Image: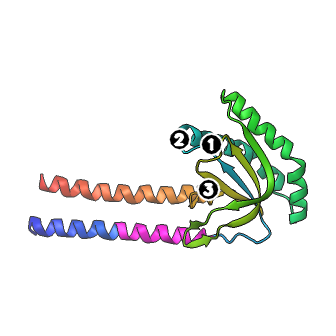
Amino acid sequence: MNRKALIYIFTSLLVLVMSWEAQRNMSVTAANLVSIPDDAIRLRILANSDSPKDQWLKREIRDKVNLEITEWVMDLDSLEHARDVIESQLDKIELIVEKELNSLGITDSFTVDFDEVQFPTKLYGNVVYPAGLYEAILITIGEGEGENWWCVLFPPLCFIDFANGDAIAGEEGKNEEDEEIEVRFFVVEIFSKVKSFFS
């Protein structure tokens, strides 16, 4: 077999592997599509600006607030009950945000509101979540002019980052990552064999 034929076979194999991985990722995305119920309560956090520092701060506050709120809503069985719990805990959310800002030495102002909040249109997978007014906790940091993050608090769907259109990796995500690494190692191994053959 001549060198030209080997290069052709190797290139074809790479295209097949990449095509297979793309199809697998599309299947995973399709499996993770989520329909948000009409009776839902969201959490939206607006960063001060799009600067790396402000976006980082938004994520820090997101993690602290989401960790606390997830425990409150996990066992709720009705929208009315969820409203009552969230309204009674708004002061606690304010304290969490204030404590996080103070611990980081940041003096930005902030507000925490529970009301009808305007959301932008967002595409997640191949599902479009339309813009509109939705019941939500809104945390605004500083001027609130940066990129936002949002999820659905009730029913609890905050393991999905709708703002970025990405599924947040859980235990299943770890398995998918392992498979991806195996595929990449397989490609590297083939490439190494072909390279050593020519050299």
Q: Residue at x 65, y 48 (%)?
A: 46
Q: Which quadrant holds residue 186?
A: bottom left
Which residue position is annotated with label 2?
51
Q: Which quadrant holds residue 32?
A: bottom right
Q: Position of residue 125 (x, y in %)?
A: 55, 69
Q: Name the mark on residue 171.
A: 3
- Kindly identify the amino acid type of the residue bearing the numbered disc 1: Asn
Q: Badges 3 and 2: C-beta atoms under 8 Å apart?
A: no
Disc 2, SS: loop
Q: Badges 2 and 1: C-beta atoms under 8 Å apart?
A: yes
* C-alpha distance separating marks 2 and 1: 8 Å
Out of 52 and 180, give the one closest to the viewer.
Answer: 52
Q: Is residue 20 magenta?
A: yes
**What colour scheme does the image use?**
rainbow
- Kindly identify the amino acid type of the residue bearing the numbered disc 3: Glu
96 shown above or below 27: above
Circle 1 or circle 3, nearest the eye:
1
Q: Position of residue 124 (x, y in %)?
A: 57, 66
Magenta residues?
A: 18-33
Which residue position is annotated with label 1?
48
Q: In the rendered view of the protein, which quadrant contains the N terminus? A: bottom left
